[in-house]
Amino acid sequence: MEYDTWRRGVGVDLKVGHGFPGVEGAQLAAGLYPKGTEFVHSVRYIDPTPEGIELAARLKELRYMVKTDWESYADLEETALAELKEDSAFPDRTKQFFGSSETGVPNTFGWRLQGFIEDATGDLRPQSFEETVFCVGCHGTLGVNDDSTFAFARKLGKEAYRGGWYHWTQKGLAGTHDRVRADGSGDYAHYLRTNGAGDEFRANAELIEDWLEAGKLPAEKEAALAENIGPLILPSPERADALNAAYRMIVRDQSFTQGRDATVAPVDGTVWREVEQDQPTGIEEIAQPWYKRR
């Protein structure tokens, strides 16, 4: 749950619509983008300044996706059901992807993705096929996105600064409210309560020390979070520098296919290289989703 991870989830640097068909011929449906929609956004280093943590001018990545085909509700449902059938019938079969580093990779839901990432000297280069498939992992069959994107679900809303239509250089995270789930709890508060940590590796000791007590989220912290998620997301200047340095090691090694999350401490206690068949997870209570199950 680092600053840049949150930023990628709620916004984009630019949203354009080149290639839209004429209004009369456009195929439209609620919750779906028209054919020809394009998204491009940058992923940046973290810049600790006297005014606070900001986006650095230096880019880690430039990500792009374009909607090349119109898929109706029925088309999308059929594709999703086919994926479920494949998983059930052939659980050990590796999912196949097509495309190339030059043309991008389609996600089977009407979108084609491509990106640029740093080479060993820090210049942007086209992503390889395998590195682009990494992007399809999130902009594919995840149940939390809408039309393969996160922009609809994470839109800040009309009550936000400029109705939510602004760039992060115009306004930072300060004063951004925690998103309220259907059950009334805050989105980030729920994550902290459920996981007792602030990232997938449970390695952000700074966040755990500042926000949790014996793995629990105190009521006063949850109340503060409801009004402003900035202090939770933004690292200290020292941690920001450490994260930047750790990521630069990944860049020098060009080891993006092994993961892009920079860690500043070993994660041996939370990551297993091997697990036994049917090994217990240790989870005692299953967390319920924000929506009601059918």
Image (cartoon, grey):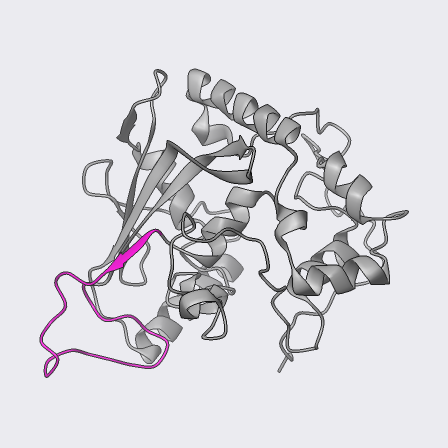
Q: Where is residue 172 in the image (x, y as percent from the top left)?
A: 50, 51
Residue 293 point in image, percent of width and height? 64, 79
Q: Residue at x 58, y 25 (%)?
A: 241
Find residue 146 and report its horizontal and vertical position in percent: 42, 68
Image side of residue 165 versus residue 229, left or right: left
The residue located at (45%, 75%) in the rendering is 158
Magenta stretch encompasses residue 21: yes
Magenta part of the chain: 13-36
Left or right: residue 115 compared with residue 26: right
Q: Is residue 60 visible?
A: yes
Could you tell me if residue 276 is visible in this image?
Answer: no
Q: Main secondary structure of the magenta part?
A: loop
Using the image, determine if residue 129 lies above or below residue 162: above
Q: In which quarter of the image is the C terminus?
A: bottom right
Q: Quadrant location of residue 20?
A: bottom left
What is the residue that sits farthest to the front in this orientation?
50
Instruction: Let me know if residue 124 is in the magenta part.
Output: no
Choose between 18 and 49: the one closer to the eye.
Answer: 49
Question: Is 96 placed left or right of 150 in the picture?
Answer: left
